[in-house]
Amino acid sequence: MRPATLLRLALAGTRTDTARVVLTALSALLATVAGLAALTVLAIPTPAATDENQNRWSEQYDNALLAQPGLRGGTAFALLMLMIPVLALAGQCARLGAPARDRRLAALRLAGATPGQVTRLVVLETGVAALLGTLVGLGVYLVGRDLLHRPDAQGRLALPTDVLPSTGALAGMVLGLPVVAALATALMVRTVTTSPLGVSRKAVRERGPGPWAGLLIGFGVAAFALIRPVVFRFDDNGGLAWLVPLLFAVGALAAMIGVVIGTGWLSYHCGRLLRRHARGPAALLAAGRLMADPWAGSRTFAALLAALIFGGGAAAQRAYFGTKDQLEQEQNRFAGLDGGTNPFYLTTMDYVDGAIAVAILIATGGLIVALVEGIVARRRAYAALVATGVPRATLSRSVAWQALAPAVPAILLALSVGTLLGRGLAAGEVSAGGGSATICEATAALCEDPATSAQYNRIVHIPEVQQAVPVPLEHLAWLGAGALAAVLVTVGVGLLFLRASTALDELRTT
């Protein structure tokens, strides 16, 4: 099959196939913008040390996250984390309209296409859609870079619009994402067999998932708990500087995978509990579905749970900085000192919370796509139930049970794990004071005069006070409520498609 023919067949299809390509391209666009933003932060040059700038700050920026070299790595990492829900959204979009695509692939097999050619069609469709998205994303990045270049009166910039990543980094991001998307698609279709009679998949195991995800979660929490002792013990050992980022990356990845896999275990056991204790037909239908495919919850909620893990960790960090800031203010007032504390860390946490809100919003889009795809894929089964006398209201409640039953414990698990990770990075208590300060008890003129200021100076000893960092229950409650609201909105949108998918005409769909 010639490459031009392969490309034409990859982009052919119905309106659903067009929507899948557009949504995949949009996801690649968002991921490209986030990735290029992270590369731009890393491309900021660090100036040489001078007498006026011994800390080597990039003073052309008014944001300390960009000016301080030690903070750019964390800023770039946060931007890269925004790619996780976007890539999860791309994975959900790739499943949109799967039954119709399967019938089209079976027709190609019937026309003489080989299994390898059919597989290359699926991979090429995802790769081309992702490439279109990355190219548009590169254009959006370059145009936005020019539009947002607005120096203030002092010549400082709010964003690093004066630097550009290297050509290799730009090419790697623009071309690498489509390659990764194509490889991921090839991995997903490895268990799919396309024959002239249709598409079949290897049967999943009937027994429920084991509780092995708890080991990954425990490993992730333990890795984060080791970060502070490693920092204090090997602070002066430059050869072990790699150990802290390794513990952070491996621990975060293990905890995230554990929570996502653990959602499958929660889904299966929620189905068992519903089957054992529920009495209504809607809950019993949902129980059967949860037990038949417990991994559906892991696939559906993966991006949302990843965002909630980082949200729980950010809430724990905010509680630490907020407690320390409050304690320092109280100690300053006790000693009679004027002047506030440094709001840098709390301001930084505001940026982090904004990024988490964006991630939850993107994850909500993935939830909607996944739920609608599941309803459309099972429309013949739903239509058959309606034909046998099952009310549509019962099916609607069943869909709601199926979404909410695993979502509530999964949200609680993700927030709990994120909080444990955040408290592993920060100490369980903060301290303030423990020093002395000189106070001048006179007018400003007398205090500024060296000849008279000494007789009005008074040394104040500030006692050291320790206070435990509270668990940020209010912040976690808001995060949980926002995630649950996202699930409810998803269910509401999915129910709009349920009525059209339960029409009796769907029984004639081949």
Image: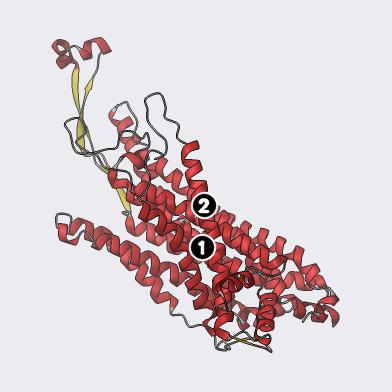
Cα separation, mark 2 vs mark 1, equals 14 Å
Badge 2: residue crowd in 10 Å (few <14, some 14–19, many ≥20): many
How far across and down, in percent of the image, does residue 212 sit? 43, 80
Which residue sits at x=55%, y=65%? 128
**Quarter occupied by residue 360:** bottom right
Q: Is residue 411 toward the left or the right of residue 324 in the image?
A: right
From where the camera sits, is residue 109 visible? Answer: yes
Q: On the image, numbered disc 2 is attached to which residue?
A: 137
Q: Quadrant of the C terminus?
A: bottom right
Which mark's residue is nearer the viewer, 2 or 1? 2
Q: Residue at x 47, y 73 (%)?
A: 183
Q: Which residue is mark 1?
A: 87
Q: Position of residue 9 (x, y in %)?
A: 64, 72
Compared with residue 48, is residue 219 higher up or lower down, i.e. above or below? Answer: below
Query: Which three-letter amino acid code belongs to the residue tagged 1?
Result: Leu
Residue at coordinates 14% horizontally, 54% vertically from top-left?
A: 236
SS type, badge 2: helix
**Image coordinates for residue 42, horizontal then vertical, percent:** 34, 49
Q: Quadrant of residue 156?
A: top left
* Depth check, front residue: 231 or 439: 231
Q: Give the crowd class for mark 1: few <14, some 14-19, many >=20 residues within 10 Å.
A: many
Which residue is nearer to you in this view: 182 or 93?
Answer: 182
